[in-house]
Image (cartoon, helix red, strand yellow):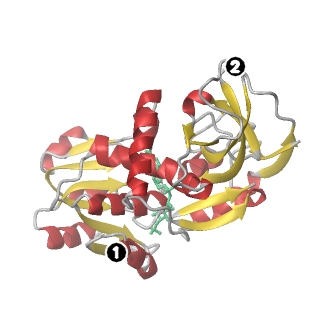
Amino acid sequence: MNHRITFQQAGGPEVLTWSEAPLPEPGPGEVRIRHSAIGVNYIDIYQRAGAYPVPLPATLGFEAAGVVEALGVNVAEFQVGQRVAYMDGPTGAYAESRNHPASRLMPLPDSLSDEEAAAILFKGLTTHMLVRRVWRPVPGEWALVHAAAGGVGLILTRWLAAEGARVIGVVSTEEKAGAVKAEGAEAVVVVPRGGSYGQLAAQVKALTGKGARVAYDSVGLDTFEASLDSLAPFGLLASFGRASGALPLVDVAELGRRGGLALQRPSVFPHVADPADLQAAARDLFEAHARGIVRAHIHAQLPLREAAQAHRLLESRGTQGALLLIP
Ligand SMILES: NC(=O)c1ccc[n+]([C@@H]2O[C@H](COP(=O)([O-])OP(=O)(O)OC[C@H]3O[C@@H](n4cnc5c(N)ncnc54)[C@H](OP(=O)(O)O)[C@@H]3O)[C@@H](O)[C@H]2O)c1
């Protein structure tokens, strides 16, 4: 029997239940993977809560690392016993084992443990999109990073700083500020939970002069206005998440009035949709990890059975870096 975490209806963490079902043989083009580490991502929370509806019942999870256990027909590029990982759909990573399309798997290098892979693949390839496709770091230019001590935030801060950008992080506690400075941020603004982002733009302008060249905003509703106001003329708001709530509707002419601003809503899924792009981005990420530009920050590893507790932790803003579930 194969254990997994399923949910029958959208709701709070309590809808996540431990269940068991037989796992069929892998179909054509699929590989059966026995998971050793599963990555928890904020999108799992949007899906569980119904903000991003999924057909139900469902098993959550886009990301895991493990070992190939069986091959479907037409799979020539992997072998039983090989270490692999993946970071996109179909969902179903919150399970002891699963079948997954071979075309979406990445072979893992010896330099990366399974836990490290599950901590950096989804978040690191998102960062790869943000620093390669959305805005390539320019030495000396300012970048504003929200949720800078989060799973994506720590990786993004370190990568930007490693390539010479001057990073201003935004976090909710002094402890998180220390973690973000350790990754290379030049300045960190602390806005406590329940506090206002109303002074953020003035603080960013005081540090930068004209404002930030780019604002990476994954917080969404609460920070959207402050991010726009923090930009230099012709700056870019990369709005890539909505942890605080759905984004407002935007009057495009308003972007002009605020200084010729650009607005983008990037997503990692189209970034790696082409299998060749996925493998190339993964090679870049693994190389960045080997060179120390990307580090795995594992806040905690919880038993898979405690997925609901992992969701409570992430939603409570109590984590720094990644959360893993261990089967
Ligand atoms: N577009 C894409 O393709 C893509 C891919 C990956 C991730 N993302 C987005 O990137 C963000 C980060 O993902 P992650 O998995 O690494 O999560 P995370 O950053 O580890 O956790 C979310 C963080 O957001 C901050 N936050 C601010 N206001 C919040 C609120 N009202 N409720 C909850 N959190 C709040 C918290 O940090 P402070 O307490 O320090 O403020 C919290 O720790 C998410 O929004 C996610 O959807 C987007």
In this view, the residue in front, 67 or 222, is 67
Residue 177 in view in this figure? yes
Q: Are marks 2 and 1 in contact (CB under 8 Å)?
A: no
Q: Residue at x 69, y 45 (%)?
A: 10
For discs 2 and 1, the disc positioned in front in the rendered view: 2
Mark 2 / mark 1, whichever is N-terminal: 2
Picture quarter with the C terminus: bottom right
Instruction: Pinpoint residue 77: horizontal percent, then vertical percent.
Output: 59, 27
Please identify the quarter of the rendering in which residue 176 is found.
Answer: bottom left
Q: Residue at x 26, y 65 (%)?
A: 167
Label 1 amino acid?
Answer: Lys
The mark found on residue 28 in the picture is 2
Instruction: Pinpoint residue 294: horizontal percent, then vertical percent.
Output: 41, 58
Label 2 amino acid?
Answer: Pro
- Residue to which mark 1 is pinned: 181
Instruction: Pinpoint residue 129: horizontal percent, then vertical percent.
Output: 36, 43
Q: Residue at x 80, y 27 (%)?
A: 25
Q: Say which element carries label 2.
A: loop
For disc 2, the neighbor class at 10 Å (few under 14, some 14 to 19, many from 20) is few
The alpha-carbon separation of the residues under discs 2 and 1 comes to 48 Å
Q: Residue at x 53, y 54 (%)?
A: 112
